[in-house]
Amino acid sequence: MTQRFTSEQVGRALERAADMESATSPAELGRTLYSLAEVEEIARESGIALDNLHRAIRELDRPRAGFVELFLGGPTSHRSEIEFEARLLEPEQEQVVRRIRKSLGQVGELSTLGNTITWVSRQGSVPIEIVIENDPDRASLAVQLRFEGLIGGLFGGIGGGLGGGASSLWVFAAKALVGSTPLAVGLGLALSFTTALGLARFIYARKVRGHVRRVEALLDELSRPDSK
């Protein structure tokens, strides 16, 4: 089934893509549904790069950040998907898998079940799963990143190291300021936790952005007409 978009989604996607181009947002569009080809034509007429348009479209259905994501400074997982206008033949499937391996620089396990091809890499702290669904008249490719390992290693390590080991220094500094030992202990622990959390959130957000950018660059490459 050809991917379709509502007028609101078209406006949001074009506005987001235009922001990437540092251009003005598009006017409101009056139609109900647009095909991907029609949206691409609108983007071309507006001078918007298709790579930015495709990336903006992938952001449309991404859930808004909840409390956990806001606390961590980034999402706990990331999923992106692209569609191909035609079924991928076996040589094209093999070429796509080779490009994935080369782009990500990771070794993964490849499995095939019916019309579904799955490539999974568990190297490092961020597992990557790529699923190619081959239908009779189209194909889709979805990438799933999970950051649980990164969360545990980063927040646990920094929280236990800086938060625990440096707390005595913060308590000593707080005692010099306020004098009262109970108040100094509470203030020192609070400052220690806040510092550790702030540092962990900064590093986590930066690492997540790096992983997401790498995946988005791969999908931008694969979504080009001459990529298969």
Image (spheres, grey):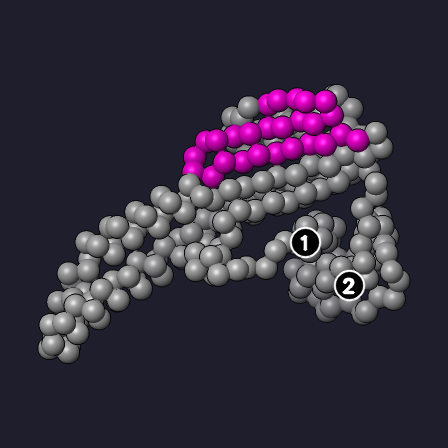
In the displayed structure image, the side of residue 15 where residue 5 appears, left or right: right
Q: Residues within 10 Å of mark 2 (few under 14, many from 20)?
A: some
Give the residues drawn in magenta, as a range.
110-135
In the displayed structure image, the side of residue 201 where residue 13 appears, left or right: right
SS category of the residue bearing label 2: helix
Circle 1 residue: 61
In the displayed structure image, the side of residue 198 where residue 108 appears, left or right: right
Amino acid type of disc 1?
Asp
Query: How many numbered markers are drawn?
Result: 2
Task: Examine the rendering and report whether any part of residue 101 can be seen.
Answer: yes
Q: Residue at x 78, y 59 (%)?
A: 10
Residue 187 image offset from top left, x and y in percent: 22, 71
- Distance Cα–Cα, label 1 vs label 2: 12 Å
> Which residue occupies the foreground of this view, 17 or 142?
142
Task: Examine the rendering and report whether any part of residue 41 can be seen.
Answer: no
Q: Which mark is residue 32?
A: none
Residue 62 location, quadrant: bottom right
> Which residue occupies the foreground of this view, 183 or 157?
183
In the displayed structure image, the side of residue 142 where residue 32 appears, left or right: right
Which quarter shows the N terminus?
Answer: top right
Amino acid type of disc 2?
Glu
Residue 30 image offset from top left, x and y in percent: 87, 66
Q: Main secondary structure of the magenta part?
A: strand
Circle 2 residue: 8
Residue 78 image offset from top left, x and y in percent: 56, 47
Q: Residue at x 66, y 39 (%)?
A: 142
Is residue 117 in the magenta section?
A: yes
Residue 60 image offset from top left, x and y in percent: 69, 56
> Which residue occupies the foreground of this view, 94 or 192?
192
Q: Residue at x 47, y 44 (%)?
A: 147
Q: Residue furthest right?
A: 31
